[in-house]
Image (cartoon, grey):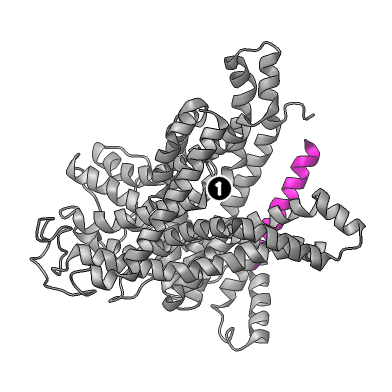
Amino acid sequence: MLRFVSREAGRLALGLLGSGLLAAAISALALPHAGDGLIAFLIAWGRTLDAFGHLNFGHSSISGGAALDELAAHLPLTMGLVAEGFAVALIVGIPVGFLFGAGPARRAAAPLIQIVSAAPIFCAGLALAYAAANLLHWPVPTDNGIKTGLSLWPHSAAEFETLLLPVLTVGLAGAAATQMALRRAGSDGAREPWRAQLRRMGLSAWEVEGVYGVPQILAGLLASLGEVMLALLSAAAVAEWVFSYAGAADLFVKSVALRDWAIVAPVLLSFAGLTLIADFIGRCAARPLADPGTPP
Amino acid sequence: MTRSSTQSLHAMLQVAGWIGLGLIAVAVSLSDFLASAPADATGIGPLLAPPSTLLHFGSDILGRDMLSETLHGLSATVRSALPATLVTLVAGALFGFVAARLPRALALSLRGFIGILASLPALLLAVLVIGLSARGWAAVAAGLSAAPFAFVRAFERARLQERATHSEYARATGISGATLLRRDLVYEFSDTILSAAARALAAVSIVLSTVSFLGFGAVPPHRDLGLMIAASKLYFLHAWWTAAFPAAALTILILFARLAAGLDEGERA
């Protein structure tokens, strides 16, 4: 197990290093004369890497503020949306995944799952907004006006209503990724020869599923944690745009539109870092579940 | 349900997907004839008229016929998605397969670099590529953003084939790596090209429509489905048909592409 974790940690470190190089290359575009040819770009890249080494991520060409300050001001909202969306994803995705991920229900639900998976997340977000406004009569902030913050810990019913729509949008995307991971693991597990062999040894179907099947399926979910994180981050970008909240994903989109590369780079680095770390944690946690005989 | 009946259901859904894509192709190629109004023609009906016998899909804020606009929007989306699909196939599936057979150090470096790109949401990667190039390059950007996942999948498949028994025998009998690669490429792509194309079409359609929704894709007056839905954002709460029909058309396109790809259970496009 230690060897496995060390190898995964090495992969994580290489991934983070590569993300840093990529982010520095993008940030280098913000330096003057970086676009004057390959040599000029490489020099700018080297300078940016040196600055990154000293935790200096440059300044916004629009607001003039430090890139790290801009990131610190916007990232908590996205992180909060992702964390609360992840909770929704687990609450909705795991029961649905187990309900439709095993036995005859798995095959019967296949066409329905295909239809649900086909709906882009921004369509789901707009459908949620429509239902909330017209059925529940909640206020829905969808104007293309000034972006606002969002109270992640609501203290009133109004704040809760405001928070629920973006969190549900992110959560549904996460739930879709979660139940897809569970279905994939369930489908793989259904083909395993040990299932029939255990039945021949006299174990009931419940025992086989509960003691051997469920840990395998959960291991499949954990191994796909990076994929779930990708779905959550994409959905956060869409939710911030649809519901007009000033998070890091919205900052990324706005900064690309304004070619504010010094801001784009740290947002990109933080998103890649989040996915790589989620992938690392998921793989390490899945290992003992998938193979209980692994020594610590 | 037995394994054989599951497989026949799978095959039936795949055929249904291809029939659906065929019907969409017909609708797209005949969109100028099927639509009762030309693209972006304003004042066809009253402003924000709900669906009726006269305007089956209603009208939008400028009095445009939503049925005609949805057909034109679908046409614009598919026309952008086709080159994007080609980019994903070449830069993802084909390049991934070939990269796995390069010298080990180079192959693993490439796999590592593309793996980093795959750790970024495809949507944000597409937005970044468009930002670095131009809005007119949205189709290429969507194709490139979907390519890392296709690359990684093709790379892993190629590595598996490299360790297969036929590869070991081929190497033992002196068959060159290039000949073996050519043979594996022919077998790989003759079996899976249609499925890989449909899978790429589903992935790029989602990315393309979402970047258009965010304002990075189609440029007015050439509206695709994503831009149509974005334009309806201000008034869809009171006029659902302005967003619902383009969203339904987009979902149907992606659904047929996913079905045609014959994705395994829980498999992402």
Q: Residue at x 57, y 34 (%)?
A: A187
Q: How many marks?
A: 1
Residue B263, above or below B21:
above
**In this rendering, would A253 be left or right of B89?**
left
Q: Is residue B47 magenta?
A: no
To which residue does mark 1 refer?
A227
Q: Residue at x 41, y 46 (%)?
A: A170
Residue A73 seen from this side: no
Q: Quadrant of residue A96?
A: top left
Q: Quadrant of residue B54?
A: bottom left
The amino acid type found where label 1 is placed reads Glu
Q: Mark 1 falls on what kind of element?
A: helix
Residue under mark 1: which chain is it in? A
Q: Residue furthest top?
A: A202
| Quadrant occupied by the N terminus of chain A | top right
Position in image of residue B245 (x %, y %): 25, 56
**In this rendering, would A33 be left or right of A113?**
right
Position in image of residue A24 (x %, y %): 62, 70
Which range of residues does the magenta coloring cover?
A: A1-21
Q: Name the dominant secondary structure of the magenta segment.
A: helix
**In this rendering, would A120 be left or right of B130?**
left
Q: Residue at x 50, y 44 (%)?
A: B11
Q: Residue at x 57, y 16 (%)?
A: A206
Position in image of residue A49 (x %, y %): 66, 70
**In this rendering, would A23 be left or right of B222?**
right
Position in image of residue B9 (x %, y %): 48, 39
Q: Is residue A15 magenta?
A: yes
| Quadrant occupied by the C terminus of chain A | top right
